[in-house]
Amino acid sequence: PTNATARGNLGICLEQIGFIDLAIAEFKKVLALEPNNFVSLYNLGLAFSLKGDYSQASSYFERAMTKNQRDPQVAMAVLGLASCYEAKQQYEEARLMIDKVISLDAHNHYAYLAKARVYEALKEPGKAIECIRKAMQIAPNDNNCKAAMSELLIRSMPNTASLDRLTH
């Protein structure tokens, strides 16, 4: 493709089917044409996250964040950066980024789901459950909310095999 939108869409398709390196190449071609293209900056952050290269991912998410901070798209870049901190077990930094999103948009259920993951990693399941409940109130039909609550409850249940051994 010769236009930036088509290249970006190709990159997204490649990323979705697992061709991360090819997707990165396409997103970089878009940036060569449009250096401040938010979607490509964000998608490069996402692609590098998928590769486990959180340093590169952070760099692209930070560049994407330089847009108008009140733009709803920017929230996704901030959450991307928070996920990089989370992956590097820098939970306080992740929580601060997530709180920034919530302060700009208290109805961003993705932010509450992200905050729940951080609280779970910090071994604070009660706070994690509250965050998921908030996300479910905001987006009651979102399957990600329902799945997050189910997974958290399953993980927080005592090991039933251990209980069986104690009772026999």
Image (tube, rainbow, N blue to C red):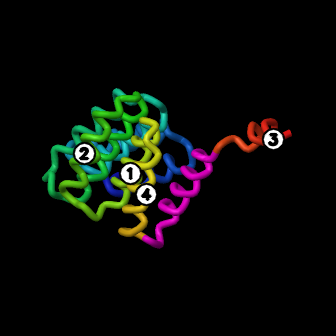
Alpha-carbon distance for marks 2 and 1?
Answer: 10 Å
Res 105 → quadrant? bottom left
SS class, disc 1: helix
In the picture, which quadrant includes the C terminus? top right
| Circle nearer the N terminus (2, 1) | 1
Per the image, the residue denoted by label 1 is: 7
SS class, disc 2: helix
Per the image, the residue denoted by label 3 is: 167
Does 149 appear in magenta? yes
Q: Name the spot of residue 87 as percent of width and height, x first.
A: 43, 33
| Circle nearer the N terminus (3, 1) | 1
Alpha-carbon distance for marks 4 and 3?
Answer: 33 Å
SS class, disc 4: helix
CB atoms at circles 2 and 1 under 8 Å apart? yes
Tell me the magenta residue range.
140-157
Q: Nearer the viewer, residue 136 or 28?
A: 136
Q: Is residue 56 above or below residue 3?
A: above
Q: Looking at numbered disc 4 in the image, what kind of residue is underneath it?
A: Ile
Q: Main secondary structure of the magenta part?
A: helix
Q: Looking at numbered disc 2 in the image, what kind of residue is underneath it?
A: Leu
Q: Nearer the viewer, residue 162 or 77?
A: 162
Q: Looking at numbered disc 1 in the image, what kind of residue is underneath it?
A: Arg
